[in-house]
Amino acid sequence: MFPQAATAPSGTGLTAAEREQLHRFYRTLHAHPELSMQEYRTAERIEAELDAMGVERFRCTQSGVVGIVRNGAGPVVALRADTDGLPMLERTGLDYASTVHGTAADGTQVPVMHGCGHDTHIACLIAALRVLLRRREDWSGTLVAVFQPGEELGQGARAMVADGLWERAPRPDVVLGQHVSNQPAGTVTMAIGPAMAGTDSLRVTVHGKQAHGSRPHMGIDPIVLGSAMITRLQTIVSREVDAHEPAVVTVGVFRGGLKENIIPEQAEFVVNVRALTEPLRDQVLAAVRRVVRGEAEVAGAPEPEIEHYSQVPPTINDVQAAEQTYNAIEQTLGTEQVSLERPRMGSEDFGLLGKAAGVPSVLWFFGGAEPGAADPPGNHSPYFAPPLEPTLSTGARAMTAAALHWLKTLSLPLSGGSTD
């Protein structure tokens, strides 16, 4: 697809024994998911695999694990897999389906499932390490395997960086990661430049004035006011954002009142904003604040509270690094299995790892749906169940091919995350 920067890697396939280890480990992970930032047993399982391979390791933040393979002088390549599950009840019917429960942040017991495929990410990275260890004579340099917790909350990458990830591990020249999706198993897709949207979450508390439902003129109705805010927020993308620039404004939570004939004193809703660039993100967030405050002023209500409680920046694939990585994976899996894609409006905290190290990063997607399936369950579905093959072998081979390319050569000057 792109001009070749180096000879493509070869021999990235798994042996029969490695494939069996991969399947066995994946089933164990799938059956025992853990909630974000609580992945303690998962971390122990990863450490046991690394110990069995003789890989140097350390804990980074409480449930993150970092493995280091030193193989002489050369580049440092970081490979990332996220490790957390989701609070949802699995309905796949698999004989290794999760039946476990965890404790949510509010103290409630919730079912837990690997509904986003992070179990495949862990298993594929472990399998790639096995192949790379077996082929140590074919490369030189250092591998840093980052098993990151808390992706679903957007907390894990920051927590690892704050715990000294790039002071305790060799600082990489490039950071590589992958994510399973419901595209056909056996395929890989990649965006060049912007790859995934950044996301921000804001909690809005609308203040009104309590009154009896029979005398609404005596109060200020925060439910009506909140509804007006939410409706007006939907005009930001349709009327204020350039139609050529993707953005999303979603309100997924709205709470207010306890009884049908009492106008409450306040209501609350939660806004999620997504954009592919930082300038557009700033524009949309400013518009959200302006609309919320403006509607309150028009209604004669007290100024609302706006709590900006979560933020993950856009995931940007460095152009030169992405082109080289794409070539390496394409030459390994075949041109018919690898293709370019548009940026996705989903979000990831993966990009924070490269940004913190000041180096380029590249993220791609590999398929986890039965080939030919008309409407396969997607990520975060209780029915999401990637077939073992070719899903796992594809993920392992893609990661191995990408790593081998960068361990063999850093042939182009890299820009540290630019998109031009």
Image (spheres, rainbow, N blue to C red):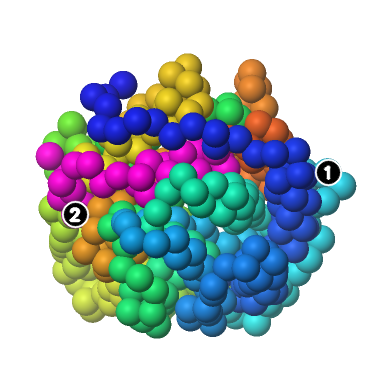
Observer-nearest of 365 and 286: 365
Q: Is residue 406 above or below residue 295?
A: above
Residue furthest right in the image = 95
The numbered mark at residue 416 is 2
Q: Is residue 405 magenta?
A: yes
Q: Amino acid at mark 2?
A: Gly
Q: Is residue 157 above or below residue 194?
A: below
Residue 23 visible here: no
Please state the horizontal and vertical placement of residue 405, each as a whole percent of the image: 38, 41
- Tell me where residue 328 sits by quadrant: top left
Q: Earlier in the sequence, mark 2 or mark 1?
A: 1
Q: Nearer the viewer, mark 2 or mark 1?
A: 2
Residue 188, x across and y down, in percent = 48, 31
Q: Say whether residue 40 is left or right of residue 291.
A: right
Q: Which range is magenta?
A: 395-420
Q: Secondary structure at mark 2?
A: loop
Calculate the distance from the C-alpha at mark 2 to the C-alpha at mark 1.
Answer: 44 Å
Q: Is residue 89 above or below residue 161?
A: above
Q: Quadrant of residue 100?
A: bottom right
SS of the residue under disc 1: loop
- The tag on residue 294 is none
Among the 4 quarters of the image, the one containing residue 271: bottom left
Residue 230 location, x and y as percent? 33, 54
Which residue in the protein does label 1 denote? 93
User: In this view of the protein, can residue 143 be seen by the observer?
Assistant: yes
Could you tell me which quadrant the N terminus lies in?
A: top left
The amino acid at mark 1 is Gly
Q: Is residue 66 magenta?
A: no
Q: Name the one closer to the observer, 95 or 239.
A: 95
Q: How many marks?
A: 2
- The residue at the point 25 percent across, 62 percent down is 355
